Image (spheres, coloured by chain):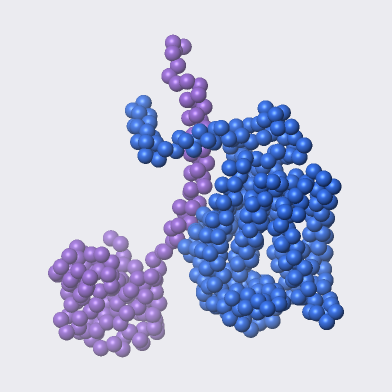
Amino acid sequence: MNLRRISRGAAAWFEERLGLNAVMELLKRKEVPQNKDTIWTYTGSLILLFFGIQVVTGIMLAFYYKPTLELANKSIGRIMTEVPLGWIIRSVHFWSATFMIAIAFIHLLSIWIIKSYRKPRELTWMSGVFLLVFTLAFGFTGYLLPWDDLSLAATKVGTDIPRSIPLVGVWVTKFLRGGDDISGDTLSRFFSFHISILPLCLLAVLCFHIYLIQKQGMSLPLGAQERVDKKRALPFWPNFVFREAIVWLIFSGVLITMAVLLPPSLSKAADLMAPAPEGIKPEWYFLFLFQTLKIFPPKILFVNGDTVAVLVIFAGVILFFCLPLIDNKPEQRKGKFITFAAYLFILYAVAMSVWSLLS
Amino acid sequence: MKLKQSLFTRRQFLNGLLGGWLGALAATFAYPIVKFLFPPTPEPEQVILPLADYSSIPPNSIKPFAWGSKPGFIKKSDNGTLVAFVAVCTHLDCTVAYLADQRKFFCACHDGWYDDNGTNIGGPPPKPLRRLVLAEEGANLIVKREVTK
């Protein structure tokens, strides 16, 4: 029992200086309401789990990855074949990104439908939209880094899209590419976005997002009786954390299974002068936007079809961002229409993605 | 035999079980991470060099080659035989230079000296320079690891 006395002494020494017991007390007092919508609460912490995995595996990959024209593709090849367990680290990074984006979509859609963004949680929603944009930007920038022909083609198309925005578009494209065309500078720029700028942006907004959630507590569903629900609430520590741990373990298992069975491929190094490979498609999370851009005709009333499409998508994102301000009375008829809009959006996104996959 | 008093409480037992299990779980995640961080850098079995490039150097001079990721020297003695060294100081891993006029290998990091056979003769180096085995096969000069005794 001597060891126990030493560890207790050490814990007391740190506690005297850090005062973390106050935080633990707060977590014990924090409550998570139990109702039909509780299951969606787990999506938030799952995104956090996958983000954590991305940080760890990303740092590890950066130990061997070399962001230059000559070495980018080769260094990934080396990670996949020579570095001990490198193939699974890259595979986990790939699959964890996929899971993170999928669950971020589910997280936002569930909040849209159960309307947890209503007053006073408007800023939580808006910071969440920023987090989604950053997450997608992670996916977009990371896709270029293996520098194979698919990733080059996807980046060419992706960085060309802003060009159709009036006034600023050309400059946005130039900024993203580091010049008029894709070059080695684009690669190092994307690497810098991917491992330094985006993580800092995401962490800052994430802290704000989590602070708001802690400050305001979990929202209750519309029409819930506060008192009845209060009685059924679970303490955050340890009850809710243990339940979360179960969900984390299950998803870690699924993640590693996918990573082992379906590791991402690596085709030959991109050639800047080669024609685009046939049948290029973006990753699944951009498919519905990709298909939307495709169905617009080249000219709509003397205006470039692309410009209209990009502006429509941009307007959609702004509406999405301002959702809590538009839907300020969720219990009324307007609220029903907003719910309907959510299902319509899901239907549209799924239909467009399937169409794009089949065409 | 039934103990009058249990050695630990049920809570301690369960905490130990859960803690041990969490520790084991952490270890299974830590293992691949640690593995990943240490890439294998095996020393080559042999390095094949074009013989003509190395046999043509003047006596009492050296020509560098790559022994895997380490620098190596091929040195021609006065009688024309070739000798191979790993050009790494045995003190703290700096690359040594050959000073032909003094017939010595010199390590500039901490003033280490070796004679032209690679024997440490001055300064901090604790051991002679590592020798490699040379063999001539047709037009190739083959450098192999020294035979371990």
- Which residue is pictured at 61% across the width and 34% down the height? A31
Which residue is drawn at the image coordinates 75% and 45% (left, top)?
A114
Quarter containing the C terminus of chain A: bottom right
Using the image as rendered, state which of residue A56 and residue A322 is in the foreground. A322
**Quarter of the view holding residue A288:** bottom right
**Residue A215: x, y in percent?**
58, 42
Q: Is residue A56 visible?
A: yes
**Residue nearer the viewer, A153 or A21:** A21
Q: Is residue A307 depicted above or below A62 in this figure?
A: below
Quarter of the rendering occupied by the N terminus of chain A = top left
Residue A71 position in % (x across, y down): 52, 73
Left or right, B73 with respect to B47, comes to left
Q: Position of residue A70 (x, y in %)?
A: 52, 77
Residue A216 appears left or right of A332: left
Residue A153 in view in this figure: no
Depth check: A289 or B84 in front? A289
Residue A186 position (above or below residue B24): below
Rendered residue at 37%/36% (across/down):
A16
Image colour assigned to chain B: purple
Q: Which chain is blue?
A: A
Q: In the depicted view, which residue is nearer to us: B27 or B65?
A: B27
Residue at image position (52%, 47%) is B29
What x and y, as percent, mark residue B36? Answer: 48, 56
